[in-house]
Image (cartoon, grey):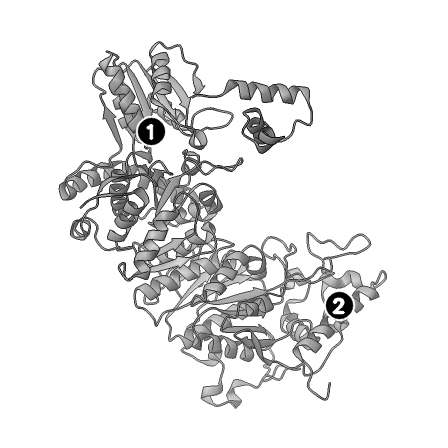
Amino acid sequence: MPFQPVKFYQTGTYTVGNRLLGQDERSEQANPQRSNSINSGHRACQGCGEALGARYAIDAAMAESNGQLIAVNATGCLEVFSTPYPESSWQVPWIHSLFGNAPAVATGVAAAMKVKGRSDVRVVAQGGDGGTTDIGFGCLSGMFERNDDVLYICYDNEAYMNTGVQRSSATPPAARTATTMPVGPEPGNVFGQGKNLPEIAMAHGIPYVATATVADLRDLEYKVRKAMKMHGARYIQIFVPCPLGFGTASHDTIRIARLAKESGMFPVFEAEHGEVTGVLKIRHKVGIEEYLSPQKRFAHLFGKHAHPETVARMQAIADRNIRKYGLLDEEGN
Amino acid sequence: MLKQTEGSKAVAEAIALCRPEVICAYPISPQTHIVEALGEMVKAGELAPCEFINVESEFAAMSVAIGSSAAGARSYTATASQGLLFMVEAVYNASGLGLPIVMTVANRAIGAPINIWNDHSDSLSQRDSGWMQLFAETNQEAVDLHIQAFRLAEELSMPIMVCMDGFILTHAFERVDIPSQEQVDAYLPPFDPRQVLDPAEPISIGAMVGPEAFMEVKYLAHAKQMQALELIPQLAAEFKQVFGRESGGLVRTYRAEDAETMIVAMGSVLGTIKDTVDDMREQGHKIGVLGITSYRPFPLAQVREALVDCKRFLVLEKSLAVGMGGILATDVRMAVRGTGLKGFTVIAGLGGRPIPKASLQKIFLEAEEESLEPVTFLDLDWDAVNKQLERERQNRHSGPIAENILHDKGMSSAAKFG
């Protein structure tokens, strides 16, 4: 056996070891009876943020629904890596139909449960940012508008990673993707208007909208459980770094997610019926450089041919988020 | 019960008798009256338990039906034309997953140019989608085929389109015998799905399948349609026992005995064709009709059997394989390969162009004389076509075709007022 150091605490985190908490406060992942909805053996890359996020989210949803859960999946990494023929990681009833229709398929499943009087069975739909903010957007908006009894979870890794890292409408400005190469006078993705899907979801006035990251899995569990206690259309967007697409080390997934939140680039908040009800404050504010520089998709902004003005524009986006959502407490630390 | 009613209304009543549990509705002419009527029945509590969902697109309509069918609910939707094309990705998905969804297609032309009237281009574009397709000749048959369709779809766990001519059938008021709930219940058992999303027995549906098994999955879809060739006549026979009338089946012939010329067609135009054939029979012409009810699966053997004793056949179809000719005609020719039979293709009624008896009689006589071109366009305005072709030869920037033709025919506002 190779030597493996045992770490009781993750350094640099605020995570308390489960053994220090009371039984009722522990993570669902500490529960020996947890559903293991996405079983081991799937084909996700090392350090995959989506696999981690989905595992926490679906196990929490299973716990909250007493095991009465049906999952719908859009085409994408999660679908592909979880069901390599002839195996399936899913320990819950699971259906994949198409890239752009997961919200509508989930509506259909929920309608079937309603008509059959199975009010105990709950429905979760899930997809990546491409399946959610681009190709599945119409179906998602329709599901929101009808307020169908579906929790939709978007695993946001800010590009089409499954097809080889192409730009989506969730890709941040300046980021290198296979379709926004770091060449020319303005390398990387354009500075567009952006497409803030949590806010678009809120504009539908649906009962619950939240964002979360895989850096704070307890917060993620809390939000999934809270969403599962509600009925109607609910939306959670989870920031899930992708080592392949971000160009980051596999062991840095959590750290990158934390920096996204601590820089203000990814605001973590929750909202009910269109109004923000809570934000996860920044604990130790970091400059945008600290978040961008470890990621190869932003490497062209630094070094010999640096683009400090672009970095400044990125900082302005983070600052705007901080102001808009009140991400810093009064002391402004 | 006999009723004087609109085709769409009659179909809606038939659907309701089949106890659908989830109905997805998106408006597109000419199917809209069907889902409107069903929506009213659900809202009034007459059709229960049933979820009626107003979706935001046809793509969502088929996707909702995929979800509800996979979760074990009898699922129905209706569409036409652009709506069918908009949902195509989900249409293939429903059949690939083997979900027994029933969908009415109120057949309508496909744009551009946009056109709301009847032809068969929409459902025939889905020829290879893995869905079965049954074509109704009358509103009575539309009613009856829907009842048979649920039975057939659920027996095979495959989806099915019931095709009825837009406006010509959907909006026609005529006498229809609406069956009783007891009759339909006796014929159509509750939906007992082959696969279902159930927390008690978790399964994965729609997983990725690579080269190791994809061929087999696709072959099985084909095998199911081959089974349907056996099942469709059985279900029609059983239907006759319960409901007391002939309806459905694979093909039907009319005055085919000793016929030397056979006319092959699908849908409501068979009525006009039969009237024309009656007239010609009276004049001593040996002419008969083959109506095809089941377009998919295509009954090759039955079509061959019906045509093998004639001398020539004419396929009259409301569809066009651009750059090739007929769509239905290609299948019919496949059925009679090796017989040496002379075949003619007539493209007719595109975009709702009337198919009058006089035009039919003229072209049937030409077929009889074997003076027809292999592919003919019924009542095509050659002046308009040639004028546009000449315009394109003369002028590089000849402009939009459809607008030019309307102008030439004196039908555009510019031609009227300018």
Mark 1 belongs to which amino acid? Val
Q: Residues within 10 Å of mark 1 (few under 14, many from 20)?
A: many
Q: What chain is tagged by disc 1? A: B
As drawn, B264 above or below A70: above
Does residue A88 show up?
no
Residue at 34% in and 48% down? B34
Residue at 44% in and 69% down? A37
Q: Nearer the viewer, residue B408 or B104?
A: B408
Give the label on residue B269, or none.
Answer: 1
Q: Nearer the viewer, residue B80 or B418?
A: B418
Mark 2 belongs to which amino acid? Met
Q: Nearer the viewer, residue A242 or B24?
A: B24
Tell me the CA gap for discs 2 and 1: 65 Å
Residue at 30% in and 13% down? B311
Residue at 24% in and 37% down? B248
Q: What chain is tagged by disc 2? A: A
Find numbered disc 2 in the image and state the secondary structure of the residue it sits on: helix
Does residue B177 show up?
yes
B189 to the left or right of B312? left
Q: Nearer the viewer, residue A235 or B53?
A: B53
Q: Which residue is mark 2?
A: A314
Residue B293 picture location, percent across and down: 29, 33
- The quarter of the picture where the N terminus of chain A appears is bottom right
A65 to the left or right of A312? left
Residue A81 picture location, percent across and down: 51, 59
Find numbered disc 1 in the image and state the secondary structure of the residue it sits on: helix
Residue A193 picture location, percent across and down: 69, 61
As drawn, B111 above or below A208: above
Give the label on residue A178, or none.
Answer: none
As drawn, B38 above or below A16: above
As drawn, B389 above or below A173: above
Q: Nearer the viewer, mark 2 or mark 1?
A: 1
